[in-house]
Image: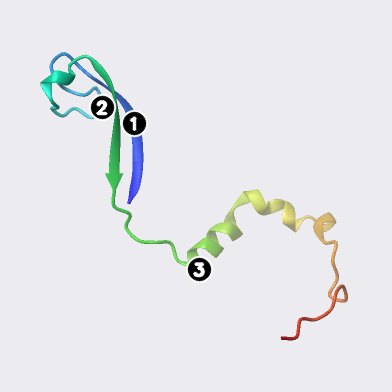
Amino acid sequence: MKAYELPATVMANGHLTWPDFQLDPALKDAQVRVIVLVDEAKDIGDDEWLQAAAQNPAFDFLSDPEEDIYELSDGKPFEP
């Protein structure tokens, strides 16, 4: 579940300014916090994460030739 916390005001008529639904009349003219819980459709799979990261402009700097500081001959091969 994903949670969203929203500020709201209970008006004199007992309605919230957002969204408009009835609450306890004792809360009239009170500042409240509303937490909305939303079911998430599904978890994001590994392929979706990889695709999102590959298309994210935050990583565009990695295509700059100045970022290519390693060669295949650097280091030692990993052999388990």
Residue 6 located left or right of residue 68:
left
In the rendered structure, which disc, 2 or 3, sits on the residue that comes first in sequence? 2
Query: In the rendered structure, which amino acid carries the disc numbered 3?
Result: Asp
Q: Position of residue 61 (x, y in %)?
A: 73, 51
Left or right for 62, reference 24: right
Of badges 3 and 1, nearer the viewer stands 1
Disc 1: which residue: 6
The amino acid beneath tag 2 is: Trp
Looking at this view, name the residue that lies furthest to the front: 26
- Residue 37 position within the rendered picture, expressed as x and y whole percent measured from the top left: 29, 44
**What residue lies at 50% left-to-right and 68% top-to-bottom?**
47
Q: Distance from label 2 to label 3 (Cα)?
A: 37 Å
Q: Position of residue 33 (x, y in %)?
A: 31, 28
Which residue does the image show at 45% across and 66% down from the upper left?
A: 45
Q: Find the distance from the CA under tag 3 to the CA under tag 1.
A: 32 Å
In the displayed structure, would residue 32 be above or below residue 55?
above
Residue that mark 3 sits on? 47
Asked if the residues shown at circle 1 and circle 2 are in contact, with their CB atoms under 8 angstroms apart, the answer is: yes
Q: CA distance from mark 1 to mark 2?
A: 9 Å
Instruction: Mark 3: give few (<14), some (14-19) or many (20+) Cα within 10 Å.
Output: few
| Quadrant showing the C terminus | bottom right
Tell me if 42 is positioned left or right of 13 in this view. Answer: right
62 on left or right of 54: right
Q: Is residue 9 above or below residue 52?
A: above
Q: Position of residue 50 (x, y in %)?
A: 55, 64
Q: Amino acid at mark 1?
A: Leu
In this view, the residue farthest toward the bottom is: 80
Label 2 residue SS? loop
Q: Nearer the viewer, residue 23 or 72?
A: 23
**Residue identified by numbered label 2:** 18
Indicate the secondary structure of the residue bearing disc 3.
helix
User: Please, which colouring scheme is shown?
Assistant: rainbow
